[in-house]
Image (tube, grey):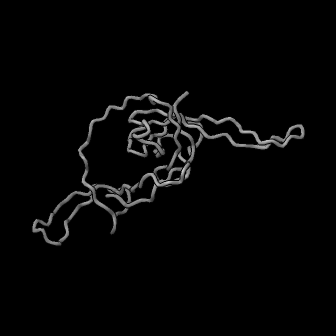
Amino acid sequence: VFRPGLPLKDPVTGKVIGYESVYLGRVKLVLADKSGGSSAHVFTVVSAKEEMGVGDRLFAVPPAAILHYARHTPDQPVDTRIASIYGGVTNAGQNQIVTINRGKKDGIDIGTVLQLSRAGATIIDKTEGRKEAIKLPDTDYGSLFIFRVFKNISYGLIMQVTDSVQIGDVAKSPE
């Protein structure tokens, strides 16, 4: 059972790159209308993460595929951004899930490991009477393991981090 979610927007372009639904739980079909009429089917809740209600959507559980997660660096240079944090929060930490704004069409695949970093701020250098803008270096603070890939977006598990992950942070090829 899923609840339709909000659109996922690319933090760089602002374009919609996908829609994320909220997982609510699992139900099991108990009684089906076999007459082809308009009567309702009856379900039993097997597990619930959140309350289920009118307007929520049912999807058949796909067959479980056996996947082998071989960690590897990307085949080509990758520069992505954190597009969302699963659960709708603004900061994430180790073992949480995030969405990035790149997918299969950009060379991302299951097992890709990316380096997390935050763009350095631009400050005004006021030393010795100067007033020029300088950019501070980017700060690397962790790693991201990609475990689910779609055409335009991918989901990753935050591995080791020394800072909180924020929407807009960079996920790039490790150096």
Q: Position of residue 171 (x, y in %)?
A: 53, 38
* Figure label count: 0
Q: Quadrant of the C terminus?
A: top right
Q: In the image, what residue occupies the spot 56% across and 48% down?
A: 12
Q: Position of residue 115 (x, y in %)?
A: 53, 34
Nearer to the camera, 151 or 31: 151
Which of the 4 image quadrants contains residue 124? top right
Q: In the image, what residue occupies the spot 56% across and 40% down?
A: 170
Q: Quadrant of the N terminus?
A: bottom left
Nearer to the camera, 7 or 96: 7
Left/right of residue 63 with respect to residue 111 in the rendered view: left
Residue extending farthest left: 35
Which of the 4 image quadrants contains residue 19? bottom left
Q: Is residue 173 above or below residue 87?
A: above
Q: In the image, what residue occupies the spot 41% across and 40% down?
A: 105
Q: Position of residue 133 (x, y in %)?
A: 77, 42
Nearer to the camera, 100 or 164: 100
Which of the 4 image quadrants contains residue 55? bottom left
Left/right of residue 85 with respect to residue 120 in the rendered view: left
Residue extending farthest right: 129
Q: Position of residue 64 (x, y in %)?
A: 25, 42
Nearer to the camera, 44 or 84: 84
